[in-house]
Image: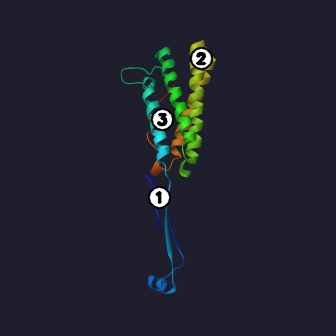
Amino acid sequence: MRSTRRGAWPRLLLTTMCVGLPAVAALVGCTVSVSVHSVDDNQYKTTWTSGWEATINDAVPWNSTGSTTGVCDKGGKKQGCFDTDQKVTPDLQSLLDGLAVAKVPSDFSEATTTLRQAITLNIQGLKDRDAAIAGNDDTLFSQGADELARASRLFALGYSQFPDYDRPTPPPFGGEGHQSS
């Protein structure tokens, strides 16, 4: 048996060459081969974790708490919203760039494609929102808000496409309840 497991979930392939009772199988020369196929997902998960931890840390001002309004929420501060977007945008770009060069395990392919679309759309939404804040443009602000809402749905969809047994952590923006708008 060959194992190349490096911190990943092993995939087991068992092949039998004949069927029957064990004694009969031994008499006719039945063979069994077992091979373990593993996916080295360490690089991907390291890129994922470091990218999301930086993003989540810089996005804290977006979040409402029991005593404060998120900076981009109604009643929040435009400058705080703009400043937070300016910190988060390069974090997301760095994550996107890192995922572009990380080896993507085949089980992560569909999720990664969807999440790359979500990150790209989220970056565009943040840029449009910031341009709207700088130019006092309500139409562009609405466009940015729409892009961020669509990105949020794509983040949820993409994260759900990872195998249940092997999702990278943390989830995008720390999981449910996070708003970038």
Residue 51 numbered tag: 3
Q: Residue at x 44, y 22 (%)?
A: 70
Q: Position of residue 3 (x, y in %)?
A: 46, 61
Work out whether residue 49 or residue 114 is closer to the camera in this orientation and state it: 49
| Mark 3: secondary structure | helix
* Disc 2: which residue: 132
Mark 3 against mark 2, which lies toward the viewer? 3
Marks 3 and 1 sit apart, C-alpha to C-alpha, by: 27 Å
Q: Nearer the viewer, residue 48 or 125?
A: 48
Instruction: Give the amino acid at mark 1.
Output: Thr
Circle 1 Cα neighbour tier, 10 Å, few/some/many (<14 / 14–19 / ≥20): few
**What element does badge 1 sit on?**
loop
Q: In this view, does 57 lie above or below 12?
A: above
Label annotation for residue 4: 1
> At 54% across and 43% down in the image, what residue appears?
102
Label located before the other in sequence (1 or 2): 1
Q: Report crowding for label 2: few under 14, some 14 to 19, many 20 or more residues within 10 A (C-alpha).
A: some
